[in-house]
Amino acid sequence: MRILAIVAAVLATGLAMTWPLTVWLLQGTLGPWPLLLVGCGLIAWRLPQARGLAFVAAIALLVVGFAIDAELGMRGYPVAVNAVLLATFALSLWRGMPVVEQLARIKEPNLPARGVIYTRRVTQAWCGFFVVNGSIAAWSALYADLAAWSLYNGVISYALIALMFTGEWCCRRRLRRYAS
């Protein structure tokens, strides 16, 4: 039973990571409704730490699908993911511990005051990233053809995420070197 859960988690993660490309490949065959429904399920599954927000985002996509257009609801998946992540990161700046500080404390439980300030700034930077990335995803959902939407949301946005991670890692190494 445990093996099945692991296999399901790996498959769902792979599907979530390749969602825009999967949509590009299957939309012509399946149509938007089945893909919209699977996308809504993926949002709820993929973001368990923000289950309430993810549920609201999934419902919003379904409302768009019913009220406006199923394909637009389907294309809204990356917008919804960015919105949920933005809300999660932004709320953590006002309540409790910022998300990046929580992650940093896993490796370094006694994070110094300078580290707390730095992780707050990184959380703010991620909020900015989610605003920009989500805005481009929204523009591509509304105005780009399916191939361009898939290219941005399935390739370019992941490259930008990797660039953001790499840039932050380089900054952190540099700051640690100067702090020593």
Image (tube, rainbow, N blue to C red):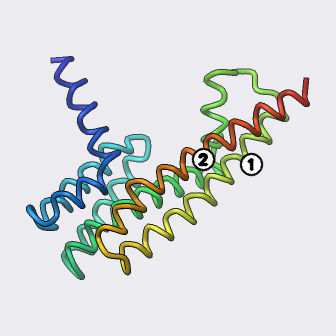
Q: Is 91 in front, or is 149?
A: 149
Dot 2: within a 10 Å radius of its alpha carbon, few (fewer than 14), some, or many (20 or more) residues? Answer: few
**Is 172 drawn above or below residue 136 in the view shown?**
above
Q: Quadrant of residue 146?
A: bottom left
Which callout, 1 or 2, points to the residue nearer the camera? 2
Look at 31% across and 48% down and name the residue there.
18
Q: Quadrant of residue 6?
A: top left
Q: Is residue 35 left or right of residue 80?
A: left
Circle 2 residue? 163
Question: What amino acid is at disc 2?
Answer: Leu
- Residue at disc 2, secondary structure: helix
Question: What amino acid is at disc 1?
Answer: Arg
Give the CA separation, mark 1 to mark 2: 17 Å
Look at 16% across and 64% down and name the residue there.
27
Look at 29% across and 55% down and name the residue there.
21
**Is 147 drawn above or below residue 105 in the view shown?**
below
- Which dot marks residue 121? 1
**Is 68 drawn above or below residue 60 in the view shown?**
below
Q: Quadrant of residue 128?
A: bottom right
Please state, as top left, top right, bottom left or bottom right, where the C terminus lies in the image.
Answer: top right
Q: Position of residue 103 (x, y in %)?
A: 60, 32
Look at 31% across and 67% down and name the residue there.
147
